[in-house]
Image (spheres, rainbow, N blue to C red):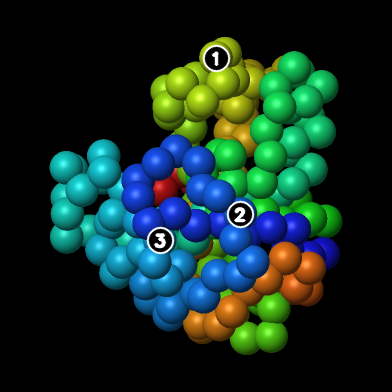
Amino acid sequence: MRVHSVNHDTQHHFSKPPVPEITLIEGIGVEGDAHAGATVQHLHLIKVDASAPNLRQVHLIQSELFATLAAAGYEVGSGDLGENVTTYGVDLLNLPTGTQLHLGDTAVVTLTGLRNPCSQINKFRKGLLKTMLHKDAAGEVVRLTGVMSVVNTGGIVRPGDQLEVVYPTEPHQPLDLV
């Protein structure tokens, strides 16, 4: 398990360009990123309650998703879906709430929930939303747009860094929308 790519953008653009490294700041998020802050920074959520805690400080997506999307006819790469950290070798979507991810030498984030896909995905790639948000054979809603987290311990994160998963104490709770 490792970090495949790190990405950030100072503006509220849909995609975030890959960069050589990011610095995670405890309780804030990615230094210099438009979504960094102790309170919500997502433009839609600010309108709802600007004083709410920011449970979306760091967005992570597993790079294995890109092959699935390519098979469906969509070219998508690291940072294209707005994630700060693209991972390899871990099924992020099936980790429980409260899972800690140790990234690189010192950084630690705690998973808070799932990212809810929005219509901006169709502006990025027409028709992509129905692939990212659909129902499985059992009728359960499947969201493929990654997971959100908060920073517990800051540090520098680079592509190629090791990633360690630390599960919370049981009983485990599945990730829900944040």
Identify the image quadrant of residue 38.
Answer: bottom left
Query: Distance from label 3 to label 2 (Cα)?
Result: 12 Å
Closer-to-camera residue (60/174): 60
Q: Check disc 3 and report the residue beneath it.
A: 33
- The amino acid type, in three-letter code, at marker 1 is Lys
Mark 3 nearby-residue class (10 Å; few <14, some 14–19, many ≥20): many
Disc 1 to disc 2, how far (Cα)? 23 Å
Location of mark 1 (residue): 126
Quadrant where the image shows the N terminus: bottom right
Identify which residue, 115 or 9, lies in the foreground.
9
Q: CA distance from mark 3 to mark 1?
A: 26 Å
Residue, x 62% and y 86% (percent of image)? 106
Dot 2 crowding, Cα within 10 Å, few <14, some 14–19, many 20+: many
Q: Amino acid at mark 3?
A: Asp
Q: Circle 1 sits in a helix, a strand or a loop, which is it?
A: loop
Residue ranking furthest to the bottom: 106
Q: Is residue 17 above or below residue 81?
A: below
Which residue is farthest top? Answer: 127
Say which amino acid is labelled 2. Answer: Pro
Q: Earlier in the sequence, mark 3 or mark 1?
A: 3
Q: Are marks 3 and 1 in contact (CB under 8 Å)?
A: no
**Place of residue 20 in the rendered image (x, y in percent of width and height, measured from the top left):** 64, 66
Residue 47 occupies quadrant: top left
Q: Is residue 73 left or right of residue 36?
A: right
In this picture, is 143 found above or below 6?
above
Q: Which of labels 3 and 2 is toward the front?
A: 2
Q: Which mark is residue 18?
A: 2
